[in-house]
Amino acid sequence: MRTRKTTIVLAIIMLAAILVSGCGSKQFPGKNINVTIQYSAGGPTDMSVRGLLDVAGKNLPKGVSFVPANKTGAGGIIGMTETAKAKTDGYNIGVISVDLLMHHYLGKTDLTKDDFIPLAVTMADPYGLVVNAKAGYQTVDEFIAYAKDHPGEVTVGNSAAGGAPHLAALAFEKQFGLKFKHVAYDGSAECIAAIAGGHLDATFTQPSPAKAQMDAGQMKMLAIMDEKRMESFPDVPTVNETQKIDFNMRGWVMIAAPAGMSEEHIAYFKDLFTNAVKDSKYKEVIASLGMQPVEYIGDDITKMLNEDDAFYKELCSGLDIN
């Protein structure tokens, strides 16, 4: 009898413990979520990320918000390093970009794509070839022909040695057997201003930074480096269609978690951001910035990462960027 009573008492104690444990479990997220952005406020990366956070934030629990902070420097390495080394408790996420792959294969950082878990892509615009609207070449065919006839004379601007615009120009050189005269500026805005002023022949940039000058008729984008034309710039052909080759180079930005975050928290963020990138309000924000709305989700993100990782590994191999 005593044994039976003891068993019943133990069962009651265990049941009570389970109930107390269940009642005491905390809802996730239960506090604000820090978001590290590796580039300065007001730029394309910052604006695309904040636009997504605004939409996704409306579906966070009451009293919980995203808290974005810009941690700039070293071409984005400082901010991306902070994200990689952040606590994996679910309350620290950040932003990575295609520059991560470039920096790694150029020996600027030990960080790799494996230090992060991708959650959502906020933008993935291709690079394009931009020239002065009054230049003697009005098509990409004419530009390539002119550059071949004038090796080392065509000046092409970039924002930094080893940066995305510089590597886009190097990839273009390699693909078509050209030789440019590379000129470094402080940023893409300076490159665009130099082209508009007739001081520079060309640059490779994503369309959004040059949108105002193109709309004003000062500059022209001869082609973009993508599989298909952009909805926001339907009249600009792709290098693929004009040259009949597979030649793509895109600049993407994605929200990511530090490797090691729990599967439960990762699943929460993926669901939250997947719904946000499909939201019409977010697409309106991206379109207003001259960017192309994208819906890279799940395996599509992994596929894009792996493709670009292989691309930049080959492009940067043995490359002298100085």
Image: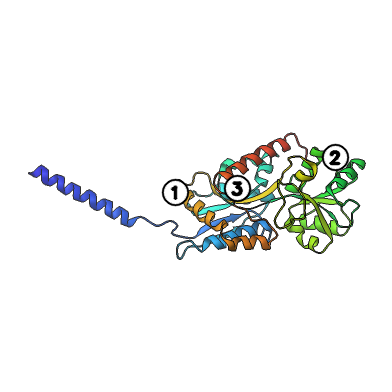
For residue 114, which numbered disc appears in the image?
Answer: none
Spatial CA distance of label 2 from label 1 is 50 Å
What amino acid type is highlighted by mark number 1? Answer: Glu
Q: Secondary structure at mark 2?
A: loop
Q: Position of residue 10 (x, y in %)?
A: 18, 47
Q: Which mark is residue 264?
A: 1
What element does badge 1 sit on? helix
Q: Of the residues under marks 2 and 1, which one precedes in the sequence?
A: 2
Q: Mark 3 and 1 residues: CB-CB less than 8 Å, in contact? A: no
Q: Earlier in the sequence, mark 3 or mark 2?
A: 3
Q: Quadrant of residue 318?
A: top right
Residues marked 2 and 1 touching at CB (< 8 Å): no
Which residue bears the numbered disc 3? 81
Compared to residue 100, the image places residue 92 above or below, namely: below
Viewer-nearest of labels 2 and 1?
Answer: 2
- Residue 120 horizontal side relative to residue 315, left or right: left
Q: Is residue 266 left or right of residue 39?
A: left
Q: Position of residue 97 (x, y in %)?
A: 64, 49
